[in-house]
Amino acid sequence: MLDTQTIKEYAYSLGFDIARITSAAAFPEAKQVIQERIGRGLLDGLPWFTAERAEISCHPDALLPEAQSIITLALCYLTEQPEEPTSQVPHGNISRYAWGDDYHDIIKPKLQQFAEWLKDYAKTTGTEEVETRLFVDTGRMVDRAVAQRAGLGWFGKNTNILTKGWGSWVFLAEIVTNLPLEPDNALKANCGSCEICLHACPTGALPNAYELDSTRCISFLTIELRGSIPLELRPLMGNLIFGCDICQEVCPVNKVAEKRLGLRDAQGKPVIALDMIKKREPITVSDTKPVKIFQPQPEFRTRPAVGSTPELIPLLALTEEEFRERFRRSPIKRTKRRGFLRNVCVALGNSKDPQAIPALVNALHDSEALIRGHAAWALGNIGGTTVVTALQAALVTEEDEEVQKEIRYALTIG
Ligand code: B12
Ligand code: SF4
Ligand code: SF4
């Protein structure tokens, strides 16, 4: 058998923060839970998330017939929080994982390099036939169930995997292989009596511990949903325009991780502490021994073109080309311009800031019906005579029935 310590050390040298191993046995409990949630409609709106997919993703040998082991990896994406904006214009909020480069693009090459190295390493022990399949997020793999069984972390009640020292601020990835490797044990840790995240969720998307109603989750609404955001949920979304971190931000386990980065001062205020940050220390192989402060991955640093709290009004003027250019390397490109500007409209409506009226009136004439409809809602939320005049004028020329409905509704609240 290959030495798992050597394998883990190689993972750390690639920048992964935790590496653990589990067998490639099936995940029957995960399959049952996922199928039950699909049955109850809790994953509606994710058309690719089918019972058949669950069947495959919970059987690693359906993904690699000779599968024997899974190397599960975590990469921490905590990075310094840019200073809070002070200007008196409406700002949006982007979830932390999207402040920097797209993690798929960062992790995939690391996994490929890892797989190559694994083949070479296996050869040194006389093993020639090494098969690997690589997964990061989009693959048909139950990332969190694998991480839990391998003891990389434990399920938080907000359904995220919490890790020792890095909290849930980690991306998960796996290498499934035909190599027999000594598995690690699951951790005994759990959330205890804490329920902070369940009460903090603004849309009630966590009705019970360990249960997410995806259809109410702001992460789903702002990233995955292609169409219109349900009217009753819009006011609950505040200024969140891409993803949501609320159930993670309130988590005490995460606060420990944030302190290590020097993200917050003694009063809990965000601070930029680059000068405090020392070189990333390697983690001991036996466990994720906490280090006091660490060097964030440079790729996860906030990109100025994206920011963490961008001004909302200028975003409404983005053309297709400008959107593509600005978010080319960012996870935000997933929403496409129409989804992103839809979210911006909702955030502007929630700001109730009259400064947004001219830009929203322009958006009433956008080429995308989705944007026109949400601009109407936002205007209705802000209200006033200019708004009513603009909405009435738009209603005369609007041809799309859904948008007409939005405008009529906006006129009732405006
Ligand atoms: C679909 C999906 C989403 C959907 C649905 C999320 C969900 N909770 O199901 C949406 C779009 C809403 C979403 C949102 C987010 N996501 Co997402 N998402 C996925 C994806 C592709 C599949 C997840 C899945 O299988 N869901 C199905 C449900 C049923 O699975 P589950 O919640 O894990 O179910 C388990 C638990 O409920 C547990 N369980 C059930 N009952 C009980 C009882 C007890 C006592 C215990 C202990 C456990 C337990 O067993 C179930 C089966 O294992 C994974 C990547 C992947 N390939 O796995 C990323 C992934 C889960 N997402 C991730 C991230 C970062 C996010 C966001 C934080 C992004 C953001 N900032 O907006 C949010 C977090 C929202 C939240 N609170 O979960 C990371 C999570 C990393 C981590 N530390 O856990 C993943 C793993 C991607 C990655 N590779 O890094 N996501
Ligand atoms: S990500 Fe936001 S909306 Fe989704 S469960 Fe967590 S707090 Fe609720
Ligand atoms: S807030 Fe509390 S209950 Fe929620 S995940 Fe964190 S420790 Fe668990």
Image (spheres, rainbow, N blue to C red):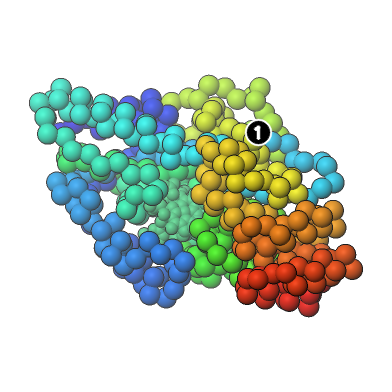
Q: Position of residue 42 (x, y in %)?
A: 46, 70
The amino acid at mark 1 is Pro
Relative to residue 414, is residue 103 drawn left or right? Answer: left
215 to 296, vertically: above or below: below
Q: Position of residue 271 (x, y in %)?
A: 71, 34
Q: Position of residue 315 (x, y in %)?
A: 70, 47
Residue at 38 percent across and 75 percent down: it is: 39
Q: Position of residue 220 (x, y in %)?
A: 53, 60
Quarter in which the N terminus is drawn: top left
Residue 166 seen? no
Whether the residue under disc 1 has CB within 8 Å of ligand 1:
no
Residue assigned mark 1? 304
Residue at 72 percent across and 61 percent down: it is: 364
Residue at 70 percent across and 43 percent down: it is: 310
Residue at 68 percent across and 54 percent down: it is: 344
Tell me where residue 237 sits by quadrant. Answer: bottom right
